[in-house]
Image (cartoon, helix red, strand yellow):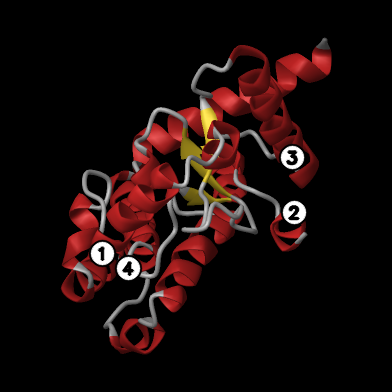
Amino acid sequence: MRRARRAGAIASEIEDLLAQYGVPLPTAAVRVLLADRGRPTTAEHLARVAASERDEFLRTRMAPRLCCAIAPDATLVTPRWWADGDWRLQRRILTEDALPLWRGHLAERLCSDLIARRRPASRELTGLVRSAIAQLDLDEELARLTDPSDWLEVRALVLDFYPGVLVADDVSTAQQAAAEQELLAADRPAVDRYFGVSPHRARA
């Protein structure tokens, strides 16, 4: 019972993070953001949450609170990206044109949060921003800033190169829309569309 409550509490926190950020979030970011909220979380905890959400869906067939981003062929994206079960399928498909928008939106929202804070950012949170910037291939531009720790400047840098991130939580890309049509036409089981097919199963 205690474990179930723990998994449920973490699931609620992740659900809140997804509502706040509006795009799928990678596990590494989820762990940093949960720790920043005072709830440090292990990989084991998150694996238990994912398993619990999948089991609950199989039992009830109701849309899960949490699910996973999937590849266009319904393969589970690993490491896991978390998504809201109420989001339309195409918003949960990781495509080439969606990935920089997801990463850029995460970086922009993190910067906006840090700008609004009165306390200094933790080393882990700063590292998460730096990692997102590097994944956007903006680390050289970041080094040229007068103050790479000025979150207003960092946010402006992201928006200069990726202006579309501001609406990444409200639109889908052309590749995502096409992938959704193909998955629906293939009549993939709903559990695969929510939680993906493990790479091992996909190769079998």
Q: Nearer the viewer, mark 4 or mark 3?
A: 4
Decide if residue 202 is on the left or right side of residue 166.
right
The residues bearing labels 3 and 1 have C-alpha atoms spaced at a distance of 32 Å
Query: Which residue corresponds to mark 2?
Result: 201
Q: Residue at x 36, y 49 (%)?
A: 180
x then y, percent, for residue 158? 26, 70
Q: Amino acid at mark 4?
A: Asp
x then y, percent, for residue 90? 35, 46
The residues bearing labels 4 and 3 have C-alpha atoms spaced at a distance of 28 Å
Query: Which residue corresponds to mark 3?
Result: 47
In this view, 120 is above or below 142 = above
In this view, the residue in front, 8 or 54, is: 54
Any mark on residue 97, and which?
A: 4
The residues bearing labels 4 and 2 have C-alpha atoms spaced at a distance of 26 Å
Q: Amino acid at mark 1?
A: Arg
In this view, the residue in front, 36 or 131, is: 131
The residues bearing labels 3 and 2 have C-alpha atoms spaced at a distance of 18 Å
Of helix, strand and loop, which one carries label 1? helix
Decide if residue 16 is on the left or right side of residue 51.
left
Quarter of the figure that contains the C terminus: bottom right
Q: Residue at x 73, y 21 (%)?
A: 6
Of helix, strand and loop, which one carries label 2? helix
Query: Which residue corresponds to mark 1?
Result: 155
